[in-house]
């Protein structure tokens, strides 16, 4: 019997529209799969979207408000009705909510609480990868190099310690939103103001011109299933508009022409970072190569369009991942402790 996958997308996030684009792309990429599309509105209400309505204008014009509302219950979503609720009949969810609600751990918490099987980062993986500072600390603990950084908090005095140019990044945001390159000291205050519009904390990193950048995606399906290594052809800085278009990619890029030793080093870093923490999710790691040394730039726990374009057979990867989800521990509550106390007191 064919497995039914639910693609959950949207959310209350600065990356809401990116998530919509990713879901529309995945509809095309996973053609032949039995899919259910579940939209999470900015008001945090779930809607069951007909596949024929999976168009960007349907959401931007509010058409989703006429769709059936869903509620999350034990093991599945259900459609409330006059004669009782009907289960949506989904076997496995795919968390495709970028940014807040999806990558910060909220959906993982809901799915875990209700015992819903899902493809996506768990609670701890979400927390560590959503916050760029935590990601660096995590990588450092595992022995994976990262670029130097400085943390600046809104309202606190600061003194940027790096020579210009530097790159300014909101701490908990992706898709290049709020990111700026500062080449002159006169631009610094404005760049920080822009970043602080999106987050209370900001990372400052030295901007490395002509750095070699590579993308590698993968997951664990018993063994590691790793994608090709891509050397994205980028301009000096990939802004939000260019990255927005990039999220709708489904064409296959060529593998990077790099030495086997460098590829092996990236593979090793990926496996180390993925570890047991990211089991059940498909992630993409963005690496820098500086003086032939591999540095982690960031971990994308829910990459745009699931980084489908990096895999030779993306459908097979998703099917395999869906059957290799981490088992949740079932804790039996038997009240032995309470009963023992009551017995020792001579009470029933």
Image (cartoon, rainbow, N blue to C red):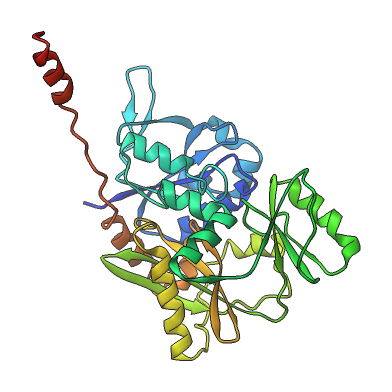
Q: Is residue 200 left or right of residue 184?
A: left
Give the residue at x 50% y 66%: 140
- In percent of width and height, residue 114 lies at 34, 34
Give the residue at x 41% y 61%: 282
Residue lying at the far front in this picture: please name it. 345
Residue lying at the far right in this picture: please name it. 186
Residue 243 shows in this picture = yes
Q: How many numbered discs? A: 0
Q: Is residue 57 left or right of residue 36?
A: right
Residue lying at the far bottom in this picture: please name it. 259
Residue 303 shows in this picture = no
Image vertical order of residue 244 relative to residue 52, above or below: below
Residue lying at the far top in this picture: please name it. 347
> Between residues 246 and 171, which one lies in front from this camera angle?
171
Give the residue at x 62% y 70%: 147
- In percent of width and height, residue 136 lies at 55, 62
> Between residues 34 and 136, which one lies in front from this camera angle?
136
- In percent of width and height, residue 237 lies at 72, 70
> Between residues 346 and 179, which one lies in front from this camera angle?
346
- In percent of width and height, residue 123 lies at 42, 46
Residue 241 placement: quadrant: bottom right
Residue 88 placement: quadrant: top left
Residue 84 placement: quadrant: top left
Image vertical order of residue 116 relative to residue 273, above or below: above
Give the residue at x 81% y 56%: 191
Q: Is residue 47 left or right of residue 297?
A: left
Image vertical order of residue 250 relative to residue 125, above or below: below
């Amino acid at each position: 019997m064919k497995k039914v996958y639910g693609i959950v997308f949207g959310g209350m996030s600065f990356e809401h529209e990116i998530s919509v684009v990713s879901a529309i792309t995945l509809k095309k990429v996973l053609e032949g799969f039995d899919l259910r599309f579940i939209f999470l509105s900015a008001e945090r209400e779930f809607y069951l979207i007909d596949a024929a309505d999976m168009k960007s204008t349907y959401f931007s014009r509010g058409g989703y408000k006429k769709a059936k509302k869903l509620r999350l219950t034990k093991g599945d979503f259900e459609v409330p009705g006059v004669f009782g609720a009907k289960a949506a009949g989904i076997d496995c969810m795919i968390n495709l909510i970028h940014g807040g609600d999806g990558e910060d751990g909220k959906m993982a918490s809901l799915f875990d609480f209700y015992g819903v099987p899902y493809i996506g980062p768990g609670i701890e993986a979400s927390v560590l990868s959503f916050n760029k500072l935590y990601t660096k600390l995590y990588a450092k603990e595992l022995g994976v190099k990262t670029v130097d950084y400085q943390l600046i908090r809104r309202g606190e005095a600061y003194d940027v310690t790096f020579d210009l140019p530097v790159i300014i990044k909101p701490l908990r945001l992706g898709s290049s939103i709020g990111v700026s390159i500062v080449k002159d000291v006169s631009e610094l205050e404005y760049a920080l103001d822009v970043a602080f519009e999106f987050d209370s904390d900001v990372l400052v990193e030295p901007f490395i011109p002509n750095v070699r950048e590579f993308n590698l995606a993968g997951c664990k399906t018993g063994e590691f299933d790793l994608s090709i290594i891509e050397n994205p052809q980028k301009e000096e800085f990939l802004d939000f508009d260019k990255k927005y278009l990039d999220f709708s990619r489904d064409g296959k890029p060529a593998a990077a022409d790099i030495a086997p030793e460098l590829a092996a080093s990236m593979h090793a870093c990926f496996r180390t970072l993925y570890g047991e923490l990211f089991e059940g999710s498909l992630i993409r790691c963005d690496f820098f190569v500086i003086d032939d040394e591999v540095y982690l730039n960031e971990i994308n726990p829910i990459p745009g369009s699931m980084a489908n374009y990096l895999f030779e057979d993306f459908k097979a990867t998703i099917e395999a991942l869906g059957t290799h989800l981490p088992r949740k521990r079932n804790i039996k509550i038997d009240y032995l402790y309470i009963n023992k106390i009551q017995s020792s007191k001579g009470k029933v």
